[in-house]
Image (spheres, rainbow, N blue to C red):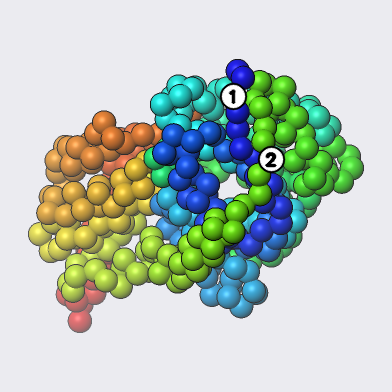
Amino acid sequence: MGEHWRYTDLGAVRPADVMAQNPVLAGPVRKGGSPVATSAVWGRTHLNVGWFDDVDDTLDLAACSRLGVDVIRRPVYGGGTAFYQEGCAVMWGFFLSPDQGGTLDEKLARFQPVLLDALDRIGLGAVGYEGSSDFRWRGRKLGALTAQEVMGVHNVGGFLNIAPPDIDLYLQVVRVPDEKFKDKAVKDMREYVCTAEEVAGRPVSYDEFRDALVGALTDSGVEIEIEALTDAERSQVADIAAYLSSEDQVRRVSSERFAAAAPPGSRVGFGNEKGGKLCRAGVAIDSAGVVVAAMMAGDMHVGPPDTMDRIADALVGADSEDEAGVKSRVAAIFEAPDVVQPEAAAVTTDHRVAAIRKAVAQATAQGRAVAAVEETT
C-alpha cells in the first residue's frame, strides 16, 4: 500500500486522557494530514460507557462510587459499556480520511487480517473474528474491532483483553440486559470473557502487543513514523479530559434523568430491541397517548453523534399508537444520507421502532395500573 502513517505509543493512560487524545490526534487527519495509529493500555480500573448508551440501564452508579470504580463516557464513539481493569486490556485506533481507502466496511475488512496477523505474532493464531465486531476464541470474547465515522474521520479501533479482569467486581457494578446476549454462545460473563493470557498459555504484555501491531501494519505496506504527543497536544488533552470527567457527560443519556424530567402527568416507559447492536428507547406519553418526550439509546456505532437526539426530538408530538407515523418520523432521520454506520454492526429503522413500541407498551401499562389504583381509592 505504501502509505505513510504517524504512530503514537500512548502507553499506560488514564481513562479520560485516552478519550481526550482521540479528537486531538484526529484533527490533523481531518484537515488532510497523514493517517494516525495509536496504541495504549488502561492505567486505571474503570467503566467505559458508549456515547449512546443509557448509563442507568448498564451501570449501578452508586455501586461504582462505593467501590471506587471510575466511570467515563466515550465522546462521540458508540458501542456498549465496557469494564477495564488497570493493565488488563490494550487498545488501538487508526484515524483515516473518509476520502481514501473506501467505506467503513471496506476499511474494516482491510484491517481485520492486519489485526489477526498481530494476534498470531503473540501466540493468538487460534482467535477468529466473529459476529458484528468480536474477536472470539471457542465462542468466548477476547476483544473487538469496530469502524465508525467520528470527528470527520474514519476510525478503525478496538481492544484486547490481555489479562483476567476482576469479574466479581464487574458483576457488582454492571447491569447486563438479557437482549444483549441472546445471540452469544456463552451467556455467563465468567465464561464469556477470555484473555490473551488464557489463549496463549502465558502472560502477554502491552509492549509485546504494541510491537506485534507495528510489525503487522508495516508488513501490510504501511510506513510507520513514531511520534510522541507534542506539548501543545498534551495541553489540549488535559482540557478535554477535564470536561469528559464531569457528571453531566457521564449522565448525558440517563433513563433516571429522563424519567425525572418527564412532563407532569405523563407515563414513562422503556424498551430494548436487539438488532445488529442493542437499541433502547424511552418515551413519556400523555393521557391522549401523544409522545411528549423521548430518549433514544443503545450500543450502536452510528454517526453523526447527534443522530439519536434528533430521532428523540422528531418523536415528540407523535401518536404513540400510530406505528406507521412513528416509523416515518424515525426513518426521516435514521435513513437520511448523512447517517452512517458499518453494515456488519447495523441497526435499522425497524429495530428502533420495535424498541419504541416496547417502551410505549410499558408506559401504557403503567398508566392503566395507575388508573386502576385510582379507581379503587
**Left or right: 339, with 192 as reference point:** left
Mark number, residue 156: none
Q: Secondary structure at mark 1?
A: strand
Total numbered labels: 2
Farthest top residue? Answer: 1
Q: Position of residue 100 (x, y in %)?
A: 45, 24
Q: Position of residue 96 (x, y in %)?
A: 50, 33
Q: Position of residue 336 (x, y in %)?
A: 24, 34
Q: Are marks 2 and 1 in contact (CB under 8 Å)?
A: no
Q: Could you tell me which residue is drawn at 89 percent across and 42 percent down?
A: 202
The residue singled out by tag 2 in the image is 226
Residue density around tag 1, few if under 14, some if 14–19, many if 20 or more, within 10 Å: few
- Kind of residue sitting beneath label 2: Ile
The residue singled out by tag 1 in the image is 3
Residue 30, quarter of the rendered image: top left
- Kind of residue sitting beneath label 1: Glu
- The one nearer the camera, 91 or 60, is 91
